[in-house]
Image: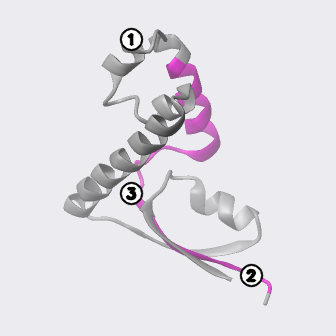
């Protein structure tokens, strides 16, 4: 079964997909496309934060929402710890990977 994603993903997501027995099609974005994808990702993550107000979603928005952390009564250290875990487990966004689709490798 194919699933179309068409979104910016963290650097280690393709590796994780493959480890789960799926194939994926990805490409590196050029700088203008990467900036557009980051804007889309910001909107996506902001919507997720607005839905559940979790510290994990704030970690995804960390670079642009420092003021929200303070307004929600959290601390930089609390959110930074979550960000570090996510970066270790799933990677950052430095490789500009766009996940186009996934497909189970078993047919």
Disc 2, SS: loop
Viewer-nearest residue: 103 or 54: 54
Labels 1, 3: front one = 1
Residues in magenta, as a range = 79-106
Viewer-nearest residue: 3 or 30: 3
Position of 84 relative to 40 (above/below): above
Asked whether residue 83 is drawn in magenta, I would say: yes
Residue in view at x 58 percent, y 56 percent: 13
Which numbered disc, 3 or 2, marks the residue that appears first in the sequence? 3
Residue in view at x 74 percent, y 81 percent: 105
Q: Which residue is mark 2?
A: 105
Residue in view at x 38 percent, y 11 percent: 70
Asked whether residue 37 is drawn in magenta, I would say: no
Disc 3, SS: loop
Q: Residues within 10 Å of mark 3 (few under 14, many from 20)?
A: many
Q: Which residue is mark 3?
A: 96
Which numbered disc, 2 or 1, marks the residue that appears first in the sequence? 1
Position of 20 relative to 53 (above/below): below
Across and down, in percent, residue 83 comes to: 53, 29
Q: Quadrant of the N terminus?
A: bottom right
Viewer-nearest residue: 42 or 23: 42
Q: Which residue is mark 1?
A: 70
């Amino acid at each position: 079964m194919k699933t179309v994603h068409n979104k910016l993903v963290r650097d280690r997501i393709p590796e994780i997909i493959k480890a789960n027995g799926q194939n994926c099609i990805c490409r590196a974005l050029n700088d203008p496309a990467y900036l557009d994808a980051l804007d889309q990702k910001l909107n996506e993550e902001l919507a997720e934060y607005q839905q559940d107000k979790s510290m994990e979603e704030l970690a995804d928005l960390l670079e642009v929402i420092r003021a929200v952390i303070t307004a929600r009564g959290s601390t930089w250290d609390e959110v930074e710890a979550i960000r570090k875990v996510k970066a270790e487990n799933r990677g950052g966004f430095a490789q500009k990977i766009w996940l186009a689709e996934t497909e189970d490798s078993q047919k």
